[in-house]
Image: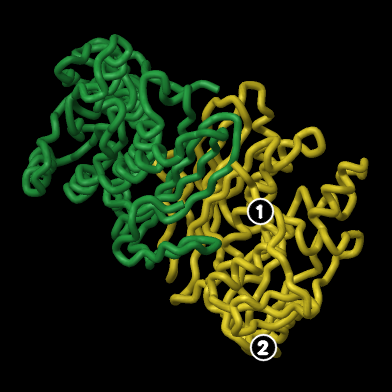
Chain colours: A green, B yellow
Amino acid sequence: MGPGSPARGELFVGDDAAILCPLVGQVVVSTDVAVAGVHLDLSLFSVADLGYKAVAGALSDLAAMGALARALVLAVTAPPGTDLEALHEGVAAAAVAAGCPVVGGDLSRGGELALAVTVIGECPGAGAVRRSGARPGDRLYVTGPLGRSAAGLRRRREGAGLDDALVLAHRRPRALLAEGRAARGAGARAMMDLSDGLGIDLHRLADASGVGFALDSVPVAEGATREEAISGGEDYELVVAAPDPGRLGEVFAARGLRAPIEVGEVVADVRARTLSGQPLERRGFEHRL
Amino acid sequence: MGPGSPARGELFVGDDAAILCPLVGQVVVSTDVAVAGVHLDLSLFSVADLGYKAVAGALSDLAAMGALARALVLAVTAPPGTDLEALHEGVAAAAVAAGCPVVGGDLSRGGELALAVTVIGECPGAGAVRRSGARPGDRLYVTGPLGRSAAGLRRRREGAGLDDALVLAHRRPRALLAEGRAARGAGARAMMDLSDGLGIDLHRLADASGVGFALDSVPVAEGATREEAISGGEDYELVVAAPDPGRLGEVFAARGLRAPIEVGEVVADVRARTLSGQPLERRGFEHRL
């Protein structure tokens, strides 16, 4: 199985395992599973969308480390009759958009359609940005306005077409790999991707760092509600804690990336978790077994 | 999700992605999916066995390249009520047996139990052994007698206990990582693991190399039938094409590994595929969608 083309010297071979060229510095790896009906409603979206979202969501975990995506492999379970061409089309489109070759895969018959996407990236030196590095006084940023994905899902349920801008944000999310590397280059101390919503993911970053936060505001995307911006999942924007307020914006500007949006500050008191001075409860999207 | 312990300096972190230390030389990666009811009958075997087999089967693909296993990640889809402790126990046991840390994972609700195991290994230099390097005149070896796994499945169906030696070979296979590295060190030109049976896997090696083969014999494991030895899958023994008849045995002996068994020769005629002078048809275990 090999949508996407070999790139940067990778050998994609029909062998027992794919062979990559040497990886530079720290290697980062993550795996994500996506199940039809659990992660995406196939009465509203296509099998290609499921493939696209699964790949973009997995690559977003590399973005959150500040890594360069080097390779992905795909494991698929599918019932007979599944449109595997459409699935591959979605997978390939997301892989190509991120410049990450699909180097291998496995396919099995099963009772439901499920994908496991494993991504491998690299960070030069020892530079992967973790969740745990935020320190009191760091400024907090997000890479864009929030709530677009949840708003898109709502709009699709209300009958919006697949090409609606917010619906597109839901079914064809972008892994912010360039933004993640820019944030690493700018000295970000902690970073996460907002896969489950700021209202839960920022708590996770604060927990890992042993700090609190004071948010001044949450940037709500046009067409989204405030609740969707706080609790909606799958935006895949990055939240960044950075010690130098000017540096992040400079590096993003120099690389032609949209300016990050300052949203607040990291504070010392681990129990202080506020938005506009009010406690921000832990809320957002959590998959449950 | 993290059974198995960090080893050799890997950072196993509850972060967006796991961070590994630099990998040496060529990086090899493979993914394998295992579905309850498709790859293992849970009325005969346990959920722990499914986890063990999935991990061992994936690691066997690294063995087939001559690689050192460095990390694995696990993606699980499971219905509510699945005994995840048992699953982890099996996964961890296989990972520990191979000295390969489990560095990350993902878990989702789903309608059936399925695992995708992705393994990452390294080969110093550019030494990964592929399927395609066999040349006329190379001698062919297998790392052990064949048919144990298929015989174990048959015996289990006939009522044998879980501790029966052949049943154990089926439910707790061993990835021959040390043997694979020894074969690479001894100058093996082509190698595969016998996951689907010699009767199909050797054809694949010959196809990839553009050669034929002349088998003198097939070593049948005690308790197995000749048919199980040829067509039974999941033995995970390695088949090796090596130019120097003595060298392979010497390296295996020096490393305390069981002597490889010579089974025949690589021939130039790509259509010549024989066992004891008779055509060996392509037959073995193929998962079908």
At label 1, counting other C-alpha atoms closer than 10 Å, the crowd grade (few under 14, some 14-19, many 20 or more) is many
Image disc number at residue B56: 1
The mark that comes first in sequence, 2 or 1, is: 1
Q: In this rendering, does residue B129 appear at all? A: no
Rendering quarter of residue A241: top left
Mark 1: which amino acid?
A: Ala
| Label disc, if present, on residue B35 of the rendered structure | none
Q: Residue at x 73, y 76 (%)?
A: B274
A59 displayed left or right of A237: right
Quarter of image, res B246: bottom right
How many marks the image carries: the answer is 2
Residue B138 horizontal side relative to residue A249, left or right: right
Q: From this view, report whether residue B132 is shown above or below residue B37.
A: below
The residue sitting at 78% across, 70% down in the picture is B144
Cα distance in 3D space between marks 2 and 1:
27 Å
Q: Secondary structure at mark 1?
A: helix
The residue at 37%/57% (across/down) is A26
Residue A52 placement (x, y as % from top left): 35, 37
Identified by mark 2, the residue type is Arg
- Of A144 and A46, which appears nearest the observer? A46
Q: Are marks 2 and 1 in contact (CB under 8 Å)?
A: no
Q: Which residue is mark 2?
A: B247
